[in-house]
Amino acid sequence: MTIYRCRVLDTPDDPFAGGELRSHEDAGIAVEAGVIVDRGEFRTVVERHPGVDIVDLREGVLLPGLVDTHVHYPQIRAIGGLGMALLDWLDQCALPEECKLADPEYARTVAREFLTGLTAAGTTTALVFGSHFADAVDALFDEADRVGVRVTAGLVTSDRNLPEPLLSSPARSYDEGRKLAERWHGHRRLRYAVTPRFSYSTSPEMLESGAALAADVPGLWFTSHINENPAEIAAVIDQFPGSADYLDTYHRHGLIHERSVLAHNAHPTDAELALMAGAGASVAHCPTSNSALASGSFPLRRHLDHGVTVALGTDVGAGSGFSLFKEGLQAYFMQQLLQGDGVPLTAAHLLHLATRAGATALGLDDVGDLSVGRQFDAVLVRPTPGHPLDVGLRHAESADNALAKIFSLATPADIARVWVGGDTVVA
Ligand code: GUN
Ligand code: ZN
């Protein structure tokens, strides 16, 4: 057992449902075999477990590990392509880079770069858009397993409207996906997600092959894009004349359920929101991506009103990096700009969106906050002495204010240590 002595902030009680930020100035968190077995005032916890090793983390602030519910592994080198909207950005920026992952050596290097970027930002759990190439997805799982981070990912499937090297067939996608799912789904911290790129690049037969894989391998996840950009939505409706709306292109194949996470949803209809809520599907809100591609303002209020679970995604490489602090801050900015139509977000909301809500979206009950019984997935924010975040944290007037300073100022350079299930993954 180890007792971590720390200043800790987390959000076990949903601030969107009236919960408040939980703050302990001098906490003891006792961890055994990766699980939090006790938590309370440091002195009390030490008294309950005399003689246990103590790790003093009071030079920083401890937060739950961050959860990224939408991030593209093959796009780390595509970050920073500014000045385009979605379909041009895909053609000019993302897809040429993704073609390069046909080379397994290249893919392995990118997988390493990706996992370094992810964990250095304090992300301990991620739903990752894989690659169109099975060997590249295998490399991602292999590296994630080596690093120890919690990753749900899958083979990205498409059979139309993309560059030829990225296209496959429904039968081949099923076979390759099945091999990957059998190898990796449920292996340690890894899970498999059926991952059609988006309806624009998939035929009904391709979506059906994903549904068949999900039927044949129990418990798989489903992820894709939805309602990101008006031109994209129009193109999808054009391709699926029989579908009621974008969501229906997935739903009619049985792909919308409580293990479904849909990225963006910047332009949903009320009917789509109602169906998502009823099915228990979640939405990954990707604020820097939506801003960079001018995709639209996320209607958070309407999602909350319908009872749809919303979490955060970085959407690297349309998003501008791996930091969920940046995504939280950008979510805040965007809601502010919506004025009366926006949701006024507090720092506690941002932490919840970046941790507990992500865990809920991904069905992971044992992560998302630092309560007794949860895995010890944690991030130590420890700014460089004298830098603005350090000054801010020393002069914060409250726990909420300290957390607001973290969301405003923290970058991956301020992440000093990261644990997953009690194992150190960044030191
Ligand atoms: N829609 C289909 N593919 C992509 C992608 O790679 N990024 C984003 N943001 N949207 C997409
Ligand atoms: Zn995306």
Image: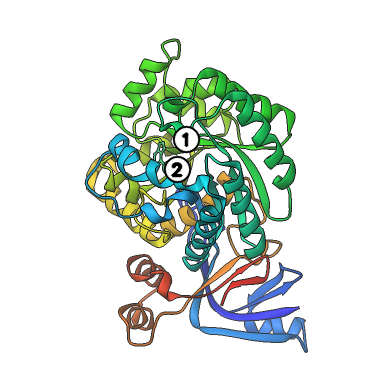
* Kind of residue indicated by mark 2: Cys
Q: Which residue is mark 2?
A: 99
Which element carries disc 2, helix, strand or loop?
helix
Residue at 34%, 55% in the rendered image = 320
Residue 307 is at least partly visible in this image: no
Residue at 60%, 21% in the rendered image = 208
Quadrant of the snapshot with the C terminus? bottom right
**Residue farthest along the top direction in this orientation:** 242
**Residue farthest along the bottom direction in this orientation:** 51
Please tell me the numbered disc located at residue 165.
1
Residue at 50%, 25% in the rendered image = 275
Which element carries disc 1, helix, strand or loop?
helix
Mark 1 and mark 2 in contact (Cβ < 8 Å)?
yes
Which percent across, then down, holds residue 58? 52, 84
Which percent across, then down, holds residue 392? 33, 79
Please tell me the numbered disc located at residue 135.
none
Compare residues 274 and 152 and report the one nearer the observer: 152
- For marks 2 and 1, the one nearer the N-term is 2
The picture quadrant where one finds residue 290 is top left
Which percent across, then down, holds residue 326? 36, 60
Q: CA distance from mark 2 to mark 1?
A: 6 Å
Compare residues 113 and 424 and report the one nearer the observer: 113
